[in-house]
Image (spheres, grey):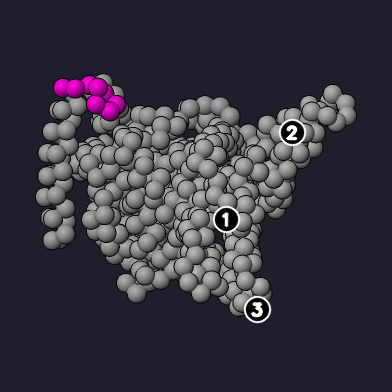
Amino acid sequence: MRTRKYQDDEFDELLQKRLRSKQERSRNPRIKGGAAKWATSHRTPKSMPAIEIENLTKDYDVGFWRKRKVRALDGLSLTVEPGQIFGFLGANGAGKTTTLKVLMRLIFPTGGVARILGRDIGDVSMHARIGYLPENPYFYDYLTAREFLNYCGELFGLDRVTRERRTEELLTRVNLETKGWDRQLRKFSKGMLQRVGLAQALVNDPEIVFLDEPMSGLDPVGRREVRDLIASLRTQGKTVFMCSHILSDIEVLCDSVAILKHGRLAQAGSLEELRAGEAGIVEVIATGADAETLRQQLGSSAIVTTTASGLRIEVADEREVDAVINALRQAHGKLVSVQPVRQSLEELFLE
Amino acid sequence: MSQLKPNAGTLINNTVSDLGLDSDNSVGLTVRRTVAIARNAFREAVRDRVLYNLVIFALLLIAGAIFLGELSAGQEAKIIVDLGLSAMLLFGVFIAIFVGVGLVYKEIERRTLYTILSKPIGRGQFLLGKYLGLCLTLLVNVLIMGLGVSLALVYVRRGWDPMAIKIWPAIFLIYVELMIITGVALLFSSFSSPALSALLTFFVFIIGHFSADLKALSGTTGSASARWLFRSLYYLLPNLSNYSVITAAAHGVVPDGRSLLVATVYAVVYIMVLLAAATLIFSRRNFK
């Protein structure tokens, strides 16, 4: 808690400093960049999407002599609102990593545009405000974890004191054992590398974090920790764009989901929206009542089945739940639970 | 819920990100980032034990110095300089070629590049940083070797010898030549495999030393097309004969200021063109 407090104070101080320099800039538009550029592009207005992708297409050339084109992304369009954890789902080869690489300027799209924080992805300075964890990350193996994070901080132009502080903060935050901090990365296990990767993606305190398979290579404990870490990013108000095919993680973490199939967007929306197709079915669990009595009372609107521990009553519409509970009361049964039957993400994914 | 309101946290964080890291591309910041890349490239070379070649160089010099003690007076200084500077050039060229072609290729192959390029680093800036890092490695190498040769001279002459100072302009020219070779290696490796790049760079190094012959050939020999070929090679490839003054240095001849200046300016321009071409190619590459 104390460190948090310290940061807040410091942030205030920095905020004041920045505001002052901003005023100076607007008084003198000739100072680097000019006032107009600042006013329009530097701060993200609330309404502006964090990420906008429009009609993104990417063709790869395959073959040496007779080149064929393979379409990795096919007219992909999506929008990610700020403050969300956005899950980008798809089978292997669906185009998740390709999308991320386009956003990170590692490959160039064949067609379409993409904007991050309202700025074109080609804008180098915008990249100071985002973080990226590649898939199966591999870093300079001759550096220690501490040196590597320090180097990343340098690339963002952070001063030495900030770099040292952020390095220690982040290595603690990703739960990397202290004795590993000054060990060369070549001696790191896959899980440890993944943690270092997460730390480097956060070194600049980014507004948007892009994570490509953040849970891969981690043991169950590690996955749990990373999951908590991502959730904590949301509380800090950051936007997280994560690729994954591990559905349970997406289900627990994400506010919105897009499902990618063969380079096309198959489905997109919040988890609730996506499941809406199946919504309505409600399952009531009860004990102590006679199945036959209930069947007679409820008629054809409910399906009553006997289970090992009692009864399971399924109704097609949540408005009928009241009738079920009344019938149960009359039959002197005991209500155990009422819950909507939701389509799992897996079913959506496989559809 | 969180998707509905970008809460106070977002705003604070937005501003904080603005603060800690200046996102405007001021010159100072660009320089700092490039220097960081260069320092890291230097650190890589050191930790990959590139500088171990100095040990072999030292052994060579010591062996030379001891055996030369047996030889006739007056000759040993000449031979020490010849041996030392030739070895310096040869070792340097090996480092320039073999480390140079791997500078970028290794980063792509090991995917370390992904993390770096996702940060506010331009591709040209990245290349420049890597280039300067290797130049720094070569500089340290050449300085230590130069010092070694000077000391060896003092040793074989059993006392002070002005040659120990007079060889340094030649050492400077060797270093400038190595900088050109590094640039060539970087350019080739921006589009081809390390093995091919190493081979091509080595050819450039060899042919570059026969620049004068190329010019002569372009004036006299054969058909018009052959002359055109020699002439374009002459202008395209670096004229490295400007930098080979080892034999002269062994005889105590110091290159004059003007030729030093010409060689330096030529190298700076040539390297700028090399880096610009490498950036142009590298900026278009897709890293699948």
Which x, y percent locates residue B133? 47, 52
How many dots with numbers? 3
The residue sitting at 85% across, 31% down in the picture is B221
Which x, y percent locates residue B82? 63, 61
Residue B28 lies, with reference to residue A186, above or below; the image says above
Residue B94 in view: no
Which chain letter matches label 2?
B
Residue B142 lies, with reference to residue B71, above or below; the image says above
Nearer-N-terminus badge (1/2)? 2
Q: Mark 1: which amino acid?
A: Gly
Left or right side of B81 for A119? left
Determine contact: label 2, label 3, CB under 8 Å.
no
Residue at numbered disc 3: B70
The residue sitting at 31% across, 35% down in the picture is B26
Q: Mark 3: which amino acid?
A: Glu
Q: Residue A297 or B59: which is nearer the viewer? A: B59
Query: Marks 1 and 2, Cα distance to the nearest angstrom?
Result: 29 Å
Stretch of the chain drawn in magenta: A27-34
Which type of secondary structure does the marked residue at label 2 adopt? helix
Residue at numbered disc 1: B252
Is disc 2 surrounded by few (<14), some (14 to 19) or many (20+) residues within 10 Å? some
Choose mark 1 or mark 2, whichever is in front.
1
